[in-house]
Image (cartoon, rainbow, N blue to C red):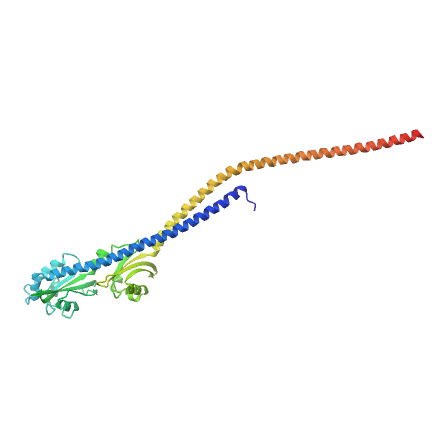
Amino acid sequence: MKLSLRSRFLLPTLLLIFIGMGVATLVSFLNTRDSIETAVTNQIEQLAASTARQVSVWLRERQHNVRLWSQDPLLRTAAMSSSDASAPTFNRRLDSFKKETSYYELLAVANIDGMTTASSDPEAVGKVSFADRPYFKEALAGKMSLSGVVKSPTSGKPVVYVAAPILSSDEPVGAIIVVLDLDSFTKEFLDPIKVGQTGYAYMATAAGITISHPDKTKIFSLDLSKLDFGRRILERKQGILSYSFEGIGKLSAFQADPATGLIVVVTANQDELMAAARQVGLVNILIALAVLIAAALVMFFVARSITRPINRYVGELADGAVQVASASSEVSGTSQSLAEGTSTQAASLEQSSASLEELASMTRG
C-alpha cells in the first residue's frame, strides 16, 4: 500500500513518541513500586522495633510498680497476718492499686506458705495458694520474678504473673503477686498500628504462640512454629520477610524483645503495595496517551500545513504537464497533416512532370 506524504511523516514520528512514552511509563512504574516497597519496609521495621521496645519498657514499669507496692507497710502486715478481720482493709488497698490503670487483672498478697491473705478479688482470700508456682518460689528467694505468658483461668486472656518479695527485717515474709493483662497492652500499643488498609501488628511468645492479634480467634491458636514463615521468624528474631499467609502475600518486619523473648510482627499486604504502584502507572499511562494524542493532532495540522502547498504545486505541475502533452499532440497532428499535404503535392508534381515529358516527346516527334 502506497503511503501519502502526510502518512510518511506522521507514522514514524508517532511510533517514536509511543515507544519513548512507553519506556518512560514502565521505568516510572518500576521506580514507584521500588520506592513504595522501600518506604513501607522502613515503616514496618521502625514500627516493629519501637513496639518491641515498648513491650520491654511497659513490663519494666509494671515491675517497678510491683516493687514499690511490695514495700507498702499495710501489705507487709497483710503478708504476716493470721486473722481474717483485717482482710477487707488489705483488699481495698490492693483494689485501689488495681484501679489506677487497666493493666492489672488481679493483685494478691500471699504469706510465706503461699496462701492468699489479701486480694483485689476478695473471693480468693484463704482459697488460692501460690505455693507451687515458680514465680512465687523465686520471690521467696528474694528475687523479682516474671512468668511467661499464660492464658488467664478467669478471663481467658493472655496474662503475665509478676511476683516480688515482701520483706521484714530483710527477710521474705510473703510475696505480692500481680497478674498483668497483656490485652490492655495490645489495645494501647498494637491495635492502633495500621499499615495501609489491611496491614496490622501482632505478637507471639518465643515459642511461637500468638498472644496478640487483630483476629482474636488466632490468640493462643495460631502457632508460628508450625508454619514455614513462622519458623524463620522464630529463628532469626529480627528482620524482614516476604511470605504468603491464608492466600495473601505479606511483607513483614519482626523484632524480638531480648528480655522476654516476645516477638512483635508488623505486616503489610503486598497487593496493596502493588495497587499503589499500579495506580501511579495507570496515571502515567493516561498522561502518555494524552501526550500522544496531542502530539498526533499537532503533527497532523503541521503536516497538513506543509503538504497542502506541496500537493497544490504538484497538482499545478500535473495540470501543466497535461497541457504540454495536449499541445504536443496538437503539434503532432498538425505535422502529420502537413506531411500528408506535402505527399499529395509531390504526387501532383510527379504527374505534372510526367505530362510535361510526354508533351515534350510528342513535340519532338
View extreme (right): residue: 365
Asked whether, in this view, residue 267 is left or right of residue 166, the answer is: right
View extreme (top): residue: 363
Q: Position of residue 348 (x, y in %)?
A: 82, 32
Q: In this rendered view, identify the residue nearer to me: 325 or 101.
A: 325
On-image quarter of the C terminus: top right
* Residue at the image position 18 percent from the left and 61 percent from the top: 180
* Residue at the image position 17 percent from the left and 69 percent from the top: 134
Instruction: Say whether residue 296 is visible.
Output: yes
Q: Position of residue 69 (x, y in %)?
A: 11, 60
The picture quadrant where one finds residue 243 is: bottom left
Q: In this rendered view, identify the residue nearer to me: 275 or 238.
A: 238
Q: Position of residue 318 (x, y in %)?
A: 60, 37
On screen, residue 310 above or below 66: above
Q: Position of residue 178 (x, y in %)?
A: 15, 63
On screen, residue 41 above or below 131: above
On screen, residue 188 above or below 225: above
Instruction: Say whether residue 125 is visible.
Output: no
- How many marks the image carries: the answer is 0
The picture quadrant where one finds residue 153 is: bottom left
